[in-house]
Amino acid sequence: PIFKIQSQVRQHGIKVFSSNYSLYADMSDRVMRTLEDMAPRVEIYSIDEAFLDLTGIQSAISLIDFGQQVKHTIDRWIGITVCVGIAPTKTLAKLANHAAKKQEHRQGVCFLKSDDAIASIAQGFSVRDVWGVGARYSERLTSLGLQTIEDLRQWSPDLARQHFGVNLARTIWELRGAACFKFHETP
């Protein structure tokens, strides 16, 4: 809360602005409608995230080019910057999006199309960066010697299920390219 950091606000000349949730919702709606115009199916995941079903897109345009097209269209039509992660599963798409944000050379778009590409990126990020792995799981995984996403990807799904439950086992399968978290269209 702002009242707890008033001295830092004054000391550093921090500018404070109120939130404008109506504007955020309007911008989100505009982005989601744009995505719905560009892809055959869209799952709105949150106010600032969506999963796109790209079935059939690759027959018309390369997926990297499509990702760049999404990025540029949203920037041009709505005026906000987005990053695009493309992969065969939701968990890998979230990892690809994370790489698109963090690795400048990707220019905001990352396509994980091969096992080698997945392994290379997974080796460069901590297990805490996996979608659905919270701080508590991250600490436990690290204590088991699983430091990177690649370590988790190579771990036994059976052991994951035994120690953490079915969702972590599914996450490992997703990191290996097998879709376990289904696509849900939202009204």
Image (spheres, rainbow, N blue to C red):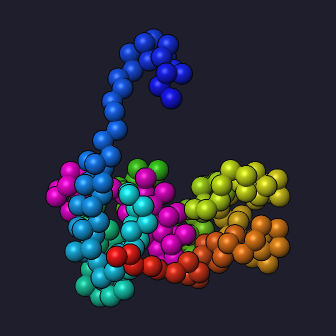
In this picture, is 117 found above or below 183? above
Expressed as whole percent of the image width and height from the top left, the position of residue 170 reads 66, 76
Expressed as whole percent of the image width and height from the top left, the position of residue 17 reads 33, 30
**Relative side of 178 to 82, left or right:** right
Residue 89 in magenta stretch? yes
**Relative side of 45 to 161, left or right:** left
At 30% from the left and 57% from the top, the residue drawn is 28
Q: Which of 97 and 182 is in front in this view?
A: 182
Q: Nearer the viewer, residue 49 or 26?
A: 26
At 39% from the left and 79% from the top, the residue drawn is 185
Q: Which quadrant: the C terminus?
A: bottom left
Report the label total: 0
At 79% from the left and 55% from the top, the residue drawn is 140
Range of magenta residues: 73-101
Considering the whole magenta stretch, tell me its main secondary structure. Answer: helix
At 29% from the left and 78% from the top, the residue drawn is 39
Expressed as whole percent of the image width and height from the top left, the position of residue 52 reads 37, 74
Expressed as whole percent of the image width and height from the top left, the position of residue 106 reads 39, 57
